[in-house]
Amino acid sequence: MKNYLSVKILILVLFSLNGALVLAQEFNFEPPFFRASWSVESSLFDCRVSQQIPGFGEARFQHRAGEALGFQLIDFSKQLDFSEVALSLQPAIWNDKDRARELGAVDLGQGLSSDMALLLMSELRSRMMPEFQGMAAYDPEQNIKVLLSPINFAEAFEAYQVCALSLLSVNFDQVQRSTLYWELEVRELNDEAKVTLERIAVYANADPSILSVEVASYTDTSGSNIFNQEISEDRAENVVSYLVAQGVEPSMIVSTAHGESREYLIHDPETSEAMKNENRRVIIVLSQR
């Protein structure tokens, strides 16, 4: 009868210095050998390569558009203390060429760095098994090991590479709210503003869940009310025109020019040039369904 059990409990009997017996438990979690697999989820916005770990949770490589590759060990039941985990590489049972290697202690609370995620991908392709070992969150006397399997990882990695090449250059969080600042009495877009608007357009054109692109223009109080309202309208119009030229659907864009309306001033009164510079702005906000 084949054994597919993926959670192993090891009871260790240790002798303390005074001769008393000490019982320690070690819980090992790993995918079932014959059914280990990696799944790939692909889109323009996100690439995920994950492995389910029965009884524990999930190992996930994630590459968001506009960001570097990352890795998370997801503990569904909060069993493992993530603050200090020993990370090592163990050779797969059919890998008789490589030896185990220690990679040191890691903090899994925020996930692993891009460099470490890339290293783990490379080692999995080389038939090595990343092992995470630390104490249980509920009992420091208990040890937990989580082992990832390299079975079928090569195929998943190829699919990930295809996905990564098609990712957008930005993600929603990076362009959801953007602010353009203006020199005194300047209406035209500068190069920095154009780059920002191009990034917004790239995302807005690709994501069907984008409901609207809101453009709101504000000035400082340097000029007259009439002048400030006019230049506020011109700046908003220039932003809208540039977005439309980049392919954004005009019906999605909602534009307002507030001029020097005091309820929208960041600084009131303006007691320095720096305060005036912050008040002269156009804010672009993307809204999703």
Image: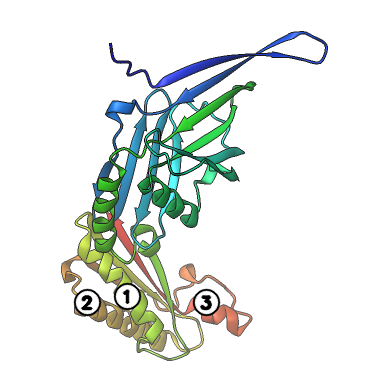
The crowd level at tag 3 (other Cα within 10 Å; few <14, some 14-19, many 20+) is some
Farthest-out residue, front: 97
Give the residue type that dot 3 points to: Glu
Work out whether residue 273 can be spotted. Answer: yes
Image mark for residue 278:
3
Quadrant housing residue 162 = bottom left
Residue shown at 27%/54% (left/top)? 288
Q: CA distance from mark 1 to mark 2?
A: 8 Å
Q: Secondary structure at mark 2?
A: loop
* Earlier sequence position, callout 1 versus callout 2: 1
Does 17 appear above or below 53? above
Quadrant housing residue 203 = bottom left
Would you name the residue on which mark 1 appears?
Answer: 197
Would you name the residue on which mark 2 appears?
Answer: 246
Q: CA distance from mark 2 to mark 3?
A: 27 Å
**Contact check, label 1 and label 2, Cβ < 8 Å:** yes
Farthest-out residue, bottom: 185
Q: Is residue 146 left or right of residue 169?
A: right
Judging depth in this view, the residue of 139 and 256 nearest the camera is 139
**Contact check, label 2 and label 3, Cβ < 8 Å:** no
Q: Secondary structure at mark 3?
A: helix
